Image: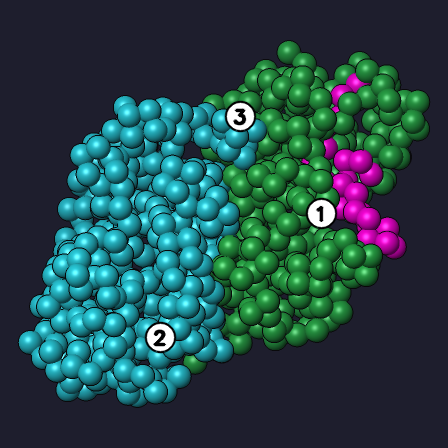
Chain colours: A cyan, B green
Amino acid sequence: MSSIVVLGAGIMATALATPLSDNGHQVRLVGTHLDRDIIDSIKQTGIHPNLGLRVPEGTTAYQLEEAEEAFADAELVMSGVNSFGVRWAGDRLAELLRPGMHVISLAKGMESDDEGNLTILPRVLAGQIPAELREQLTFSAIAGPSIAGEVAVRRHTSVVFTGEDSSVIEMWRGLFATSAYHVWTNTDFVGVEVCAATKNCYAFGAGFMSGVLDAMGEAAGDRYVNYNYGAALFGQASIEMIDFMRLLGGEPTTPIGLPGIGDCFVTSMGGRNVKCGRLVGSGLTFSEARDQMPGVTLEGAAAIKVIGGALGPLTERGLITPAQFPLLRHLYEVVGLDQGVDVPWDSFFGSNGSGVL
Amino acid sequence: MSSIVVLGAGIMATALATPLSDNGHQVRLVGTHLDRDIIDSIKQTGIHPNLGLRVPEGTTAYQLEEAEEAFADAELVMSGVNSFGVRWAGDRLAELLRPGMHVISLAKGMESDDEGNLTILPRVLAGQIPAELREQLTFSAIAGPSIAGEVAVRRHTSVVFTGEDSSVIEMWRGLFATSAYHVWTNTDFVGVEVCAATKNCYAFGAGFMSGVLDAMGEAAGDRYVNYNYGAALFGQASIEMIDFMRLLGGEPTTPIGLPGIGDCFVTSMGGRNVKCGRLVGSGLTFSEARDQMPGVTLEGAAAIKVIGGALGPLTERGLITPAQFPLLRHLYEVVGLDQGVDVPWDSFFGSNGSGVL
């Protein structure tokens, strides 16, 4: 039996207590300053209000000011904050971690500098920690198609654990894997994380197919929907994810299977990000759509601004051609520049429908 | 302006009259013996009863006994019959075609011999025609994500035309391509057609995720569905489609984009095949599920029997290992051997979640 400390008590971080608990481990959920009500609820009733479920046996909740107690004798740490909180989490962990500890993180996204250089979030997280301590830690991450609530109620889920050290990610796999939570390991850290970040961009576009129909109203009828449209965007997304491997140093086969195509599928099936894409597809500008969803975090839209925004500088530097990433470039026009949806179909699919330029 | 003769008046064959008509071409729809009522309806009212739409301007319907009139001065022929009618269509075309004519076909599937050797359907079609005539014809095919009704009402659709001769498929592209019907060309004839055939197998499995929930009934609640399950099957399907390229001589990149992943997406979104998979996922045997859908053609299930059935002989011959194609092997157990659904998750995704064995 091990103890795993989790920083952040969002739905995915909490859902992962289920497989850990099923394997007999103790989970210490430490809420951020944004999770105060969640932690209060778990302490008082055992219920995570956003998941709508009782946390599993062996899970204990801590407010942020109780973090030192939670971290006291632990060696295993999960950073459960989302992409907006990664630097904050790194700063907290810099105070709480000790040499020899292992960190696994959930946040999906990338950061970009002014020249378009993109960095995966586990590296951003690690970068907040002083080098001397950092070198005595390991960093891994969880990726792959995984809706939190389904994990929490033990629906079959197949994921990928990634990191640079195969023995470390095998150790993590041993802690998490159950008969419902199936875990593969992949040492292509950059490739897996780039898939996880970019799939959020493409899932925003998956909302367009429904939005276009919404705009047609009754004229669209209800018999013939817009799956051909969605399938074409999905196909182009798969091509661009593979192109990102070439650009950023991942293995070209990594997007095949769970990390890219599988995760893009599940993320395209619904959620806030797809809903916002649908509003934009119906004719609203992104600014108007975002105003209709006050207080909602839109990680996909944020990822489009960062990753899509990097494509211009990368093109100027000659690292990519203007013909590459036409879908993400258009998503950036829509989300970053508030332009209308006008899918550039004829720039897709290379010359042969499968991405050869 | 050209005239295109179409053998078969099903929904896909008829839907493709829309882009042809939009480009000013004449379409002559020749019904099979199964299409008699459809042809009567079009002759009397202009309405295709199964599409629920008026056929476009420039479309003329013919009963099968009027085929010679329809073929009289035509050079361009579309074989619009489905996979069950390919040999029948080839026999009819053997009587109706003349040297110099071009044939493009729609049927998706493969045939297998006792040793597991698989043949794409355009080759089966061509094989019904005497060699001397056959050598004076060209054969091409249409593939890619394309729901017929959406094509008929001009929803954006992106497809791939394939064949051995690039100038011929470019000619076909010129006839069909419109501002809504986007056409790419790919000379990997085997690769594109193998994608088109196998995606029907995997789409049957896409029904399982809903069926498993159906079996749980109210216990499943309505908040947490089963997308993680479906995403994992979709990811494994993408791996196996690429493995089929290695086995059958297609380009390993062909499934990326429209022919494989894009088409598998749209086919997994619904239809009779997915509905039957859902019934099986809920606990019925395939035989029981099929009995609940009398008179319905199930091309996906038929493809599983043929292609899945070939995996045994191919394994015995050492052309594939027992570890390859675990999803299609299970689909064959379910459809071909009437066994229950018991997804072999741990045999999926190779060692790293992306298909490397």
Q: Quadrant of the N terminus of chain B?
A: top right
Please give the label number shown on residue A152: 2
Mark 3 and mark 2: Cα distance apart in space: 44 Å
| Residue designated by label 1 | B247
Mark 1 and mark 3: Cα distance apart in space: 24 Å
As drawn, A164 above or below A302: below
The answer to if B162 sits in the magenta stretch is: no
Front position in the image: A137 or A112: A137
Q: Position of residue B293 (x, y in %)?
A: 68, 62
Magenta segment: B101-124
As drawn, B149 above or below A69: above
Q: Quadrant of the C terminus of chain B?
A: bottom right
Mark 1 vs mark 3, foreground winner is 1
Rendered residue at 33%/73% (across/down): A16
User: What amino acid is labelled 2 in the image?
Assistant: Ala
User: Horizontal placement of B159 versus A331: left or right?
Assistant: right
Mark 3 vs mark 2, foreground winner is 3
- The answer to whether dots 1 and 3 both sit on one chain is no
Furthest-left residue in this view: A65
Q: Position of residue A26 (x, y in %)?
A: 28, 85
Please give the label number shown on residue A351: 3
User: What amino acid is labelled 1 in the image?
Assistant: Leu
Q: Quadrant of residue B300?
A: bottom right
